[in-house]
Amino acid sequence: MPERTIAIGDIHGYDVPLEALLARLSPTADDTVVILGDVVDRGPNTRRCIELLLQLREQCRLVFIMGNHEEMMLSAGNDPRVAESWLGFGGRDVVESYDGDLDNVPAEHWDFLRSGREHFETDSDIFVHAAVLSDLPLDQQPTDALRWMKTTGREPEHSSGKRVICGHTAQRSGIPRTWPGWVCIDTCVYCDSGRLTALDCTQNLLYQADHDGNPYGPADL
């Protein structure tokens, strides 16, 4: 099998669909798997999601992009005032996955969260958590755009000519949103009928799994 670049959308603590997707994709040492951020918060098992990604790091090249929810969790770990507001944005689910206390988060998990990158790019694609400003090169993008800006489906193509692969803006239909130069693969895994989505960017194939780990795809993008 030729080497692949695979992007996985917002995981939000849903370990069962993540494990199902990884089993379906079977990444090898030749593959690059790009995690688009928001691994944490809202779902039932953030702890196990991070453990699965740490294991995945031993199998393939893993690129982890920091999302706004990782940013909030890291801030909460340093400032009790931030922690109080973070709990209402899904942080309470994270704490429960660590047996009710952030002090139980292993150092390796904090290190993983801190390792998150702002962006990643290949010869054909740009990977970010949220969005990019079309007229700025990647190294000049503001953090607010990369981690927090919602997309509308009307954003222009990036000046580099590369396709932007992003998450962050939840597609409650469960279907990735595509428009010229962009693909958003946050398919609202935390919704009642949500799914976790992976995109094999090399072959433009979509893979999904639901809350119970039932697989769907591959399907053409």
Image (cartoon, grey):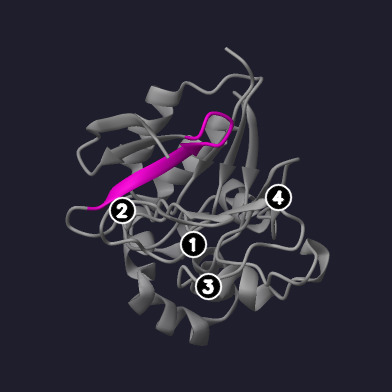
Asked if marks 1 and 4 touch (Cβ < 8 Å), the reply is no
Measured as percent of width and height from the top left, residue 139 is found at 82, 64
Give the mark nearest the N terminus, 1 or 4.
1
In front here: 180 or 170?
180
**Residue 189 marker:** 2
Report the disc number at residue 72.
3
Q: Earlier in the sequence, mark 1 or mark 3?
A: 3
Q: Are marks 4 and 3 in contact (CB under 8 Å)?
A: no
Tell me the quadrant of the picture where the N terminus can be found: top right
The amino acid beneath tag 4 is Phe
Q: Which residues are magenta?
A: 194-204
**Mark 2 or mark 1, earlier in chain:** 1
Q: Residue furthest bottom?
A: 81
User: Mark 2: which amino acid?
Assistant: Val
Tally of numbered tags: 4
Query: Which residue is disc 1 drawn over?
Result: 103
Question: In what quadrant of the picture does the C terminus appear?
Answer: top left
Which structural element holds mark 1?
helix
Residue sitting at 39 percent across and 69 percent down?
91
Q: CA distance from mark 4 to mark 2?
A: 23 Å
Q: Residue furthest top?
A: 1
Q: Is residue 1 above or below residue 95?
A: above
Q: Sequence-wise, which precedes: disc 4 or disc 2? A: 4
Element carrying mark 4: strand
Marks 2/1: CA–CA distance: 27 Å
Distance from disc 2 to disc 3, alpha carbons, whole Å, reads: 19 Å
User: Foreground mark, 1 or 3?
Assistant: 3
Residue 2 vs residue 220, the one in the foreground: 220
- Looking at the image, tell me whether mark 4 or mark 3 is earlier in sequence order: 3
Residue hosting label 4: 120
